[in-house]
Amino acid sequence: QVQLVESGGGLVQSGGSLRLSCAASGRIDSRNIMGWYRQAPGEERDLVASVSSGGSTNYAASVKGRFTISRGKNTLYLQMNSLKPEDTAFYYCNVRLGGNVNYWGQGTQVTVSS
């Protein structure tokens, strides 16, 4: 079992910055992909950014150049700059292990006011 706990969400004005953190614990394979997803009310949960255990990153087009994903040994970060109202959503931490096994955190709310 893997546990993921997000922190760092909150309310920020348009143009501001936030940094999300995700602390992972439990049995995590050495080969894995960790990522941030977000879901706005009435919408699907979409990938924001991911980073593999080898360091390869992937970003949604809407956040490229504004968000930066990084990871430590058992921690995942998302630095969000130049935030826009459309970035408002619940943000979830995810880890994908071998066999396409996925674990999710409980999420953290990010609200960007205009």
Image: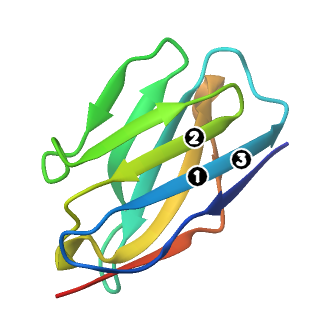
Task: State the residue at coordinates (29%, 31%).
Answer: 58
* Disc 2 from disc 1: Cα separation: 6 Å
Task: State the residue at coordinates (62%, 28%).
Answer: 72
Q: Position of residue 68 (x, y in %)?
A: 33, 40
Q: Position of residue 55 (x, y in %)?
A: 45, 16
The quadrant of the rendering that contains the C terminus is bottom left
Res 8 seen here: yes
**Badge 2 vs badge 1, beta-carbon distance below 8 Å:** yes
Q: Nearer the viewer, residue 47 or 91?
A: 91
Task: State the residue at coordinates (19%, 61%).
Answer: 82
* Residue 88: numbered disc: none
Mark 3, secondary structure of its residue: strand
* Disc 3 from disc 2: Cα separation: 7 Å
Q: How many labels sit on residues?
A: 3
Task: State the residue at coordinates (58%, 52%).
Answer: 21
Q: Which of 13 and 46 is in front in this view?
A: 13
Residue of label 3: 23
N-term mark: 3 or 2: 3
Q: Which of 114 and 28 is in front in this view?
A: 114
Residue of label 1: 21
As shown in the figure, which amino acid type bears the numbered disc 1? Answer: Ser
Residue located farthest toward the top when viewing the structure as drawn: 54
As shown in the figure, which amino acid type bears the numbered disc 3? Answer: Ala
* Residue 76: numbered disc: 2
As shown in the figure, which amino acid type bears the numbered disc 2? Answer: Leu
Mark 1, secondary structure of its residue: strand
Q: Where is residue 88 in the image (x, y as percent from the top left)?
A: 31, 77
**Badge 1 vs badge 3, beta-carbon distance below 8 Å:** yes
Mark 2, secondary structure of its residue: strand
Please tell me in which quadrant of the rendered image residue 111 appears. Answer: bottom left
